[in-house]
Image (tube, rainbow, N blue to C red):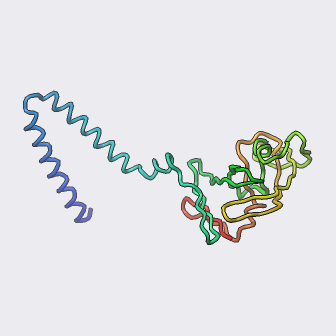
Amino acid sequence: MEDFEIANLIYLGALAAVLGSWYIVQNKGGLSKMVRDAAAWVFIFVGALAVIGLWDDIRQNIMPRQTVIDDAGRVELPKGRDGHYRVTLTVNGKSVPFVVDTGATSVVLTHAAAERIGLDPDNLVFFTQAMTANGPVDTAPVTLDNVTLGPFEDSRVSAYVNGGDMDTSLLGMTYLNRFDSIQIKGNLMILER
């Protein structure tokens, strides 16, 4: 333990002794009330310390940092609580949430995302297949007219609509390859053009 830490502990101990003595003198008549009040203050103090100590985790869970886009051609995506990187792109003028998936060859849309951007999954032809962790799934190839992420706008992006159940769309390598650099630093995925 360093000298300044020892000095801080001595100071805090002296402060606690003074406050404790003052409290005892003020409540000399009721020992049970004094113990109850002291216990309440101890719980408040321990709770405050816990919140301070866990603030970074609490802040990330309650108010997760959003995607940061700067003018220099850099996009920072924060890692979510589930360990995935998520981003919302504008596809054909509509917001579509994606999980960034460097293991996916292509951009893959859910049925709901396809409908949102103006495609009718019931009229698509599911003649291709993709291998997933759960086995093969039928897919329908589509072309996305316009895909926008911050200042980056791309036209005619190849994608697939998934024929199976999927919770969220996947942002695969056919889109990610449009960036010059993909890095992971700490809890950030950094995309640069």
Q: Residue at x 65, y 69 (%)?
A: 192
Give the answer, above or below, for where 131 lies relative to 3. above
For the N terminus, the quadrant is bottom left
In front here: 69 or 126?
69
In front here: 116 or 28?
116
Q: Quadrant of residue 2?
A: bottom left
Q: Residue at x 13, y 39 (%)?
A: 23
Q: x, y percentage for residue 83?
A: 59, 51
Q: Residue at x 60, y 59 (%)?
A: 77
Q: Is residue 142 left or right of residue 9?
A: right
Q: x, y percentage for residue 161?
A: 82, 47
Q: Is residue 71 left or right of residue 167?
A: left
Q: Quadrant of residue 41?
A: top left
Q: Residue at x 73, y 62 (%)?
A: 176
Q: x, y percentage for residue 67?
A: 59, 57
Q: x, y percentage for residue 27?
A: 10, 33
Q: Is residue 89 left or right of residue 45?
A: right
For the C terminus, the quadrant is bottom right
In front here: 185 or 123?
123
Give the answer, above or below, for where 29 lies relative to 101. above
